Amino acid sequence: MRSPQVDESLNDEPKKSKGFRFSLKWEWALSTVFGVLVIFGVIVFLIFNSFMTVLMRQEKTHVADSINVVVERLNNQQTPLTSAGVNRQLRPRAVLGTTKQPGASYNNAVITSLARDSQTVTVFDAQGNELFATGRSKVAFKQTRKQRIVTQTINHRKHLVGRMPIKAKQGNHLLGYVQVTDNLRDYHTTQVTLLQVEIVLGLMAALAAAVLSYSLATFLLRPVEAIRDAIHAVREDPQTDVRVPEMHHQDELSDLGALFNDMLDTTQRYMDQQQQFVEDVSHELRTPVAIIQGHMEMLNRWGKDDPEVLDESIKASLQETKRMQSLVQEMLDLQRAEQIEVNYPNEVTDVSEVVLQVFDNFKMIHPDYIFILDDDVHHALQAQIYRNHLEQILIILLDNAVKYSQKRKEVHLTYESDRRNLEIAVQDFGEGISQENRDRVFNRFYRVDKARSRTKGGNGLGLSIAKRLIEAYHGRITIESALGHGSVFRISLPILSDADAQVLNEKKEQIQAANDVPGIQSQLLEDSPVDSAEQPDDSSKSDF
């Protein structure tokens, strides 16, 4: 047990400041928001790029259309281009047909091309001299052999610049050049608008994701809060019965809650066992210690000078010492029986062989008794149980049958099976047990007749050990009794198939090989409560 100082330090530890921290709900919510924003950003980026690519393609188409319209208007000339001639062909009044000059006609395509605010149309002669411009352009003239539309940065802004030579339809000789500069004003305006819309949508998506994820986290993490509350309750009171409430949905958190409850139940059981162990031992040791102390005090006062009193006190003290030794051994056996799941998970035993061996041993050591074996199996049956434990169970039952069959010295041992379970019954023809006592015969230190049980030996632990052993191996033990007619104790164990027995044996061999511990089997046998080679003695006996 921990000292008070250690417990106090442990209790104070969680109270220390650990700095600012997020709760799991907020971590979940922020992580979800971050994930939503990343996914949203990737999708928006792809859509935005696709949309802007389409817009850029449209802008290039407009530039190309403007170039083609101007070239189509001017390539009918036979003489080199002049400023007056270009102005006559491209000025709005000529285009609209408001002059009286022949050949001037209405052309909506030219009006549309020259009327765009975002575009500047410039016409050069063959030597690169500017002849016509719809506005001021900062793009220098460059000769080109064919139509080219390129992207160019002017004053830190992207522009489209299209160039194309003007060649006469007749003779295909060079007349000049046309250059169209598009400042992409509509393109940039649409780009900014889209970015603003995307930012607003992103913030709305983040807010919605935060609210939804926080609400969902609050709902889904209720089992974690229940587990936390249970931990705090157990920490404040280790004996509390507070457990994680049963969860109706089946998921990992419900499994965690069930495992946590199982762990608390197991811990509580071990604590109860430890407390009961201390109480039982204290109670049972009180009498022999008081007897030994009384004899020692009597000898110390006057009895040591009387040989008869001295001899009687020594014998009584030795007898009580042996009884305490037997008590301690049986308590250790009981503690081992409560830890079988950990120490003996893969043991396989031939039950038929053990039953016959124990039956022969009792016939040999009790020649004045009649032992009858009713074997309805007649073949080997295997069960998942440690051999020495099965021997100990049978020894406890047969020893009790012998102990309480004083008048009719006869004991029957029955061995039978069905498809799933094997059953061993031990019947005596002794005193029998009443219904009231029958429900308590498996309790620790319980004796039907305590005065007579003292004379027969034992400490009332045998049946408790047998019950713990048989239940640890998923079996069961029952009793049938009638006063004056004797009792029948029945134990039942699941039958192990040959395939399952082989799997367990292979697993046991693998564990032993992995541990690489020499003589591990012999060590297990040494640590076992009852050695199969030993004869039953007083330390393994018990009574009810």
Image: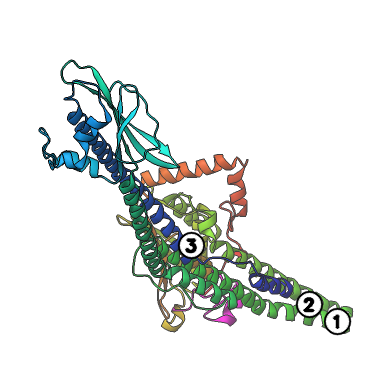
- Which x, y percent locates residue 185? 33, 47
Distance from Cα at disc 2 to Cα at disc 3: 75 Å
- The amino acid beneath tag 2 is Ser
Element under label 3?
Answer: helix
Q: CA distance from mark 2 to mark 1?
A: 9 Å
Could you tell me which quadrant the N terminus lies in? bottom right
Residue range corresponding to the magenta coloring: 439-463
Camera sees residue 439: yes
The residue at which mark 3 appears reads as: 27
Q: Position of residue 188 (x, y in %)?
A: 35, 48
Kindly indicate whether the residue at mark 3 contacts the one at mark 2 (C-beta within 8 angstroms): no
Q: Earlier in the sequence, mark 2 or mark 3?
A: 3
Residue underneath mark 2 = 313
Q: Amino acid at mark 1?
A: Gly
Q: Residue 167 in the image: x percent, y percent?
A: 22, 21
To which quarter of the image does residue 530 belong? bottom right
Q: In the image, is residue 361 above or below residue 329?
A: above
* Residue drawn at point x = 36 percent, y = 66 percent: 212
- Crowd band around label 3 with a 10 angstrom C-alpha radius: few (<14), some (14–19), many (20+): some
Residue type at numbered disc 3:
Glu
**Which of the two marks, 2 or 3, is nearer to us in this view?**
3
Residue at the location (68% across, 76% down)? Answer: 285
Q: What residue lies at 61% left-to-right and 75% top-to-bottom?
A: 275
Dot label at residue 303: 1
Residue 451 is one of the magenta-drawn residues: yes
359, 166: nearer the viewer: 166
Q: Earlier in the sequence, mark 1 or mark 3?
A: 3
425 left or right of 171? right
Question: Up-down: is 222 above or below 103?
Answer: below
Picture quadrant of residue 502:
top left
CB under 8 Å between discs 2 and 1: yes
